[in-house]
Image (cartoon, rainbow, N blue to C red):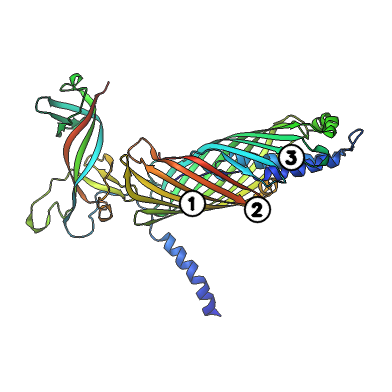
Amino acid sequence: MPAKHLRSSAAFPRAAASLAAVLVSLFPVSGPCQITPEQASQLRNAIGTRVEALTILGGDYGIAAANFRSTGKFSFGESADATVTVTKLGGAGDIGDPQPLGSLPIGWQPRLQGNMGWLDGTQHLHSDLVAGDITEIKTYGIEFGGGARLWVNDRLSFAPTLTGLYGHTAETYTANSAFMHANLEAARQMGLVDWNVDTWTVITGVDFQYLIALDRTIITLTSTPVYYYTASFQSSNVHLNVHGDSGTWANMIDVDIPLGVELYGHELRSGGYYRWTGLYGDLRDGLHESNLSEIHGRVVLDFLNQLWKVQWIGIGASYVWGANITGWSAGLDVVFRF
Amino acid sequence: MRELSRRISHPPLFALASVLAGCWTAPVATVQPHGEARLIQGAIAVTSVKDTAVVSSLDRSAGIVVLRSFGKPETSTYKLAPKLSGLDDIKAGDVVQATVTEDLTVYVLHDGQLPDARGTVSVDARVLMVDPSYRLLTLQYPDGQKETFKVPLGTRLEQMEGGDSVVIRPLEVLALRRRG
């Protein structure tokens, strides 16, 4: 079934801002660094939570589900002065027609999902001692997994899945302030700036789906709870580790409307969806968001059974918002059916 | 109090029952469709790609090619499309990939009969699945093979269902490409 769209990284700016504030508070204006082991540990824990959140945000298909997406830009208000760009190329889909599951009155299809994602966040710091400094985070992730969709009847199905996600996150700190010029090396040695970390994430979830046909219009209701466990296996600083639990619960209504008009031999279709995604655990803490909403619209040409494995090609746009962020994406909307 | 709790609990139960109503069953083309024997629609123009067809004969001057599916004795006669090119390389006996147009006629039949003693119909395939939204009509041939067609706007798919009988009339070859 259909395609979906873009995601954002909201929390990064606020998380970065709070980290910067902590960073500043830990260093004296002059003289040697006075940070205690407890304070450094707290700060690294905050970094770990942020890495976990950004890895999921940038690398997981589900939270930003899309079959083909463009780049989105997100802003966080003037006070944050930060932007995050998330680019994803991925998808999830059921393969072939449902087949009988033994002698049970249940149909099943194999389901595959995968994603490649990039996240690039930049924050210009303005607070007192670090004014003029820039912190940049880059994350990329590769995800692959699968499961099965089980059809209870012609309308209701559910798809349990298991997915693995590899993530690499690196932070670069550009010190322009006199304060950080004096303390950059100390911060670096403590693993608070200029760090990088490799992570793996195990993702398990269930995608419940209910189809409603109104004349030729298809309405799809989905509800997808997902659990993430993330841990690091390599980092630039021996004290910088990532491990934690996150969760999402996405609920979506998608409407797919054939317009009855052909263009170049292909029927025009319109539609879109509204999705609400609740964020839980470290993902919520790392992004400083409890939920995200997304509204998406599209105009596409139907290629199903006319071009190999292509369901539609068109354009689409999304608007994403949460308590602290807004974002958008626009671009090519392509959905494949295998 | 009991009445109140019953009122509260019934809507969710009703909704649940509605959602779960019926069990999943694999589509079947050999069932008897509902309703009286009738013609549902004729002259449904479709395009089909025959991946492995054998050229039984080719008459360039008459603009006729006879094809049969690989491993089957039945043949179908098509006209050559006016702009069809590459025929010089094709000869009888060649295995080709053929893009053809065909007309589908869909019936509800009872025992292969049309109503009012209008005679029997030689059925080529049965309807297996119908997708009105994307205008897909999946047929199953007597040998079990399936083929999905994109049917034109205006096709009365809402009246079609699994088990309907389909007569296929070959029309024209749009492209021929020799395989191997």
Looking at the image, is mark 2 or mark 1 earlier in the sequence?
A: 1
Respond whether the residues carrying marks 3 and 1 are from the same subunit.
Answer: yes
Query: Where residue A295 appears, x then y in whole percent?
Result: 52, 51
Is residue A24 toward the left or the right of residue B166 in the image? right
Evaluate if marks 2 and 1 touch, with contact meaning CB atoms under 8 Å apart. no
Residue at the disc numbered 2: A323
Residue at the disc numbered 1: A273
Q: Which mark is residue A47?
A: 3
Location of the C terminus of chain B by quadrant is top left
Q: Secondary structure at mark 2?
A: loop
Which mark lies nearer to you, 3 or 1? 1
| Neighbours of disc 2 within 10 Å: few (<14), some (14-19), many (20+) | few
Spot the residue most to the right: A31
- Amino acid type at circle 3 is Ile
Query: Where residue A126 appears, x then y in whole percent?
Result: 77, 41
Gap in angstroms between the C-alphas marked 3 and 2: 22 Å
Residue A334 found in image quarter: top left
Residue located at (74% from left, 39% from top): A47
Q: Secondary structure at mark 3?
A: helix
Gap in angstroms between the C-alphas marked 2 and 1: 20 Å
Gap in angstroms between the C-alphas marked 3 and 1: 34 Å
Which mark lies nearer to you, 3 or 2? 2
- Amino acid type at circle 2 is Ala
Residue A144 found in image quarter: top right
* Image position of A146 with respect to A292: above or below: above
Is residue A212 something one can see in this rendering? yes
- Amino acid type at circle 1 is Tyr
Looking at the image, is mark 3 or mark 2 earlier in the sequence?
A: 3
